[in-house]
Amino acid sequence: MTGKANKHSARASAAAEDQLVAANAAFGRRDFAEAERLLRVTLAATPRHAGALHLLGATCAQTGRHEEAVTLVRQAIGLAPRDASAHNTLGIALRRLGRFDEAIAVYEKALALDPKLVDALGQSRPRASCPGPARRVARALRGGLATAPKVGGCQT
């Protein structure tokens, strides 16, 4: 690569990181439309950006597009397989789709990568009114988590 190409690549990378910081801020404000816009700009310039793919997947999950979230987060994991947070996000999307066996396997992988990782969606134990699969997710996670995730409308 020439010096000119290196400078262009460095500028593109810096711009992508700036966009990602802005997208993270928008996501934190729950401005999911702005986060998605910024992430799509980032990915247009750097399509193999694991962080942008992960955050776009999380954004899709937050807006109810769980199948799209699964696709995007799996792409992110393909690029950064040791990212426990991405595995956790994938588990959330799978769980929301009712794909509990897959979610359990993904949560177990996330916990193997980072035993301190806690799914921030839930803080309590299963209720009797929760469906059986939700209780199974909670039981499977109890070995590695002090708290368990929320499944559907149930705290597990």
Image (cartoon, rainbow, N blue to C red):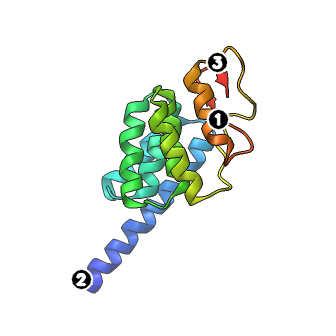
Position of residue 33 in the picture relative to residue 123 (left or right): left
Using the rendered view, name the quadrant where residue 57 is placed: top left
Q: Which mark is residue 1?
A: 2
Q: Secondary structure at mark 3?
A: loop
Q: CA distance from mark 3 to mark 2?
A: 58 Å
Quarter containing the C terminus: top right
| Identity of the residue drawn at 33% across and 58% down | 48
Amino acid type, callout 1: Arg
Amino acid type, callout 3: Cys
Q: Is residue 35 visible?
A: no
Q: CA distance from mark 3 to mark 1?
A: 13 Å
| Identity of the residue drawn at 27% across and 78% down | 5
* Residue under label 3: 130
Amino acid type, callout 2: Met
Residue 71, percent from left and from top? 35, 41
Q: Nearer the viewer, mark 3 or mark 1?
A: 1
Using the rendered view, name the quadrant where residue 119 is placed: top right
Q: Nearer the viewer, mark 3 or mark 2?
A: 3
